[in-house]
Image (cartoon, rainbow, N blue to C red):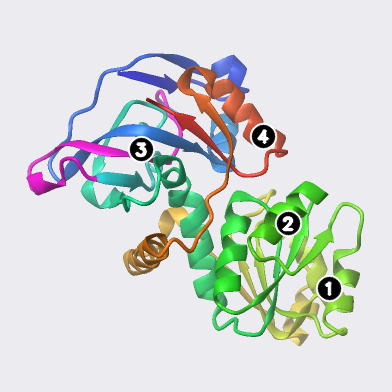
Amino acid sequence: MRAAWYLKNGEARDVMVVGDWPTPQAGAGEVLVRLVTSGVNPSDVKSRRARPLTEAIVPHSDGAGVIAAVGDGVPASRVGERVWIWNGQWGRALGTAAEYIALPSAQAVVLPDSTDFAAGACFGIPALTALQAVYLAGDLRDKPVLVTGASSAVGHYVTQLVTLAGGQVIGTVGSPAKAAHAQAAGMREAIFYKTESVAQRVKDLTAGRGVPVIIDMDFASTAGLLAEGVLAPHGRVVCYGANTPEIAFNFRAMLFQSVALQFFLVYELTAADRQRAQDRLTELLQSQQLQHPIGARFTLDQIVQAHETVEAGQTVGNVVIDLT
């Protein structure tokens, strides 16, 4: 089969290789998936740059395709199923930037016929992260919710899900184009964080009360806002990422506001949380209630350009590699 891989950390154009790779086989409890698409996420490029490695890495955790074969213990009836993949390259070397992937049967989830393979490459990280974040945020009916990065891959799903839950999204965005993208998903109010004070705009929009919930993509940036009245007393921050590993924050301000902090990593969801998120996603897909915007598509031979596009951060929508 054809695949892309790297043997050392570095810039995509310096370390990425595309060529022939042995086709994997489905072991006991596994399925072999003929991949049609592979999703490229920010975590994939961060891993390529810095995550320690001891062997060749075929990158990407997300993808979609058709089950081509099954291993012992997996019903033969699964052959031919359209599926999407989660954790394709988490805790293992061989991800979805290849024509085939073998992985545990549970990590290949049925993809409804009404959902295309490009959308299926957006679920493992963006959609499941958004579903878990909104679940942890609690009852959002009639509540203003600050969504940082509302036009990002995860934020766009968060915006849709908060809206479906009856909340009103106040989103931070970086440009008019990104604002329009988030507004199409249901965002009520845009805050242009590069040119506006996020704290002041939130206060203006909430009559000085602050929001009861923040769903956050970068706690390194958001931590400083918590001492500025952005979050209402007894409010909750649900966070799924940060751009720096060590973050200082005003503990006294959060203590006296009785702030609740909830962090989670989508790769390490409990079995119960993951199943609940998958069930909810399937329900939303079957009722066609979600948008899955694809911002750029590349071939496997263009994987360097795909990674550089994600790193540039200017593309509106998900970045997908077509493998067929």
Q: Which stretch did the figure color magenta?
A: 55-81
Q: Name the residue rendered at 37%, 25% in the picture.
A: 324
Tell me the CA gap for discs 2 and 3: 28 Å
Return the residue at label 3: 92
Of marks 1 and 2, which one's residue comes earlier in the chain? 1
The residue depicted at 43 percent of the width and 21 percent of the height is 4
Would residue 311 be seen by someone viewing this image from the given angle? yes
N-terminal-most mark, 2 or 4: 2
Asked if the residues shown at circle 2 and circle 4 are in contact, with their CB atoms under 8 angstroms apart, the answer is no
23 versus 123 height, above or below: above
Return the residue at label 2: 220
Q: Which residue is mark 4?
A: 311
N-term-proximal mark, 2 vs 3: 3
Q: Amino acid at mark 3?
A: Arg
Residue 57 included in the magenta stretch of the image:
yes
Q: Label 1, secondary structure: give it.
A: helix
Q: Is residue 47 left or right of residue 105?
A: right
Instruction: Name the outermost residue toward the top.
Output: 19
Mark sitting earlier along the chain (3/1): 3
| Residue type for callout 1 | Val
Label 2 sits on what residue type?
Ala
Which residue is painted at 63% across and 57% down in the image?
A: 155
- Left or right, 181 with respect to 83, comes to right
In the rendered image, which quarter is residue 145 located in? bottom right
Callout 2 crowding tier (Cα within 10 Å): few <14, some 14–19, many ≥20 = some
Q: Nearer the viewer, mark 2 or mark 4?
A: 4
- Compared to residue 33, the image places residue 158 above or below, namely below
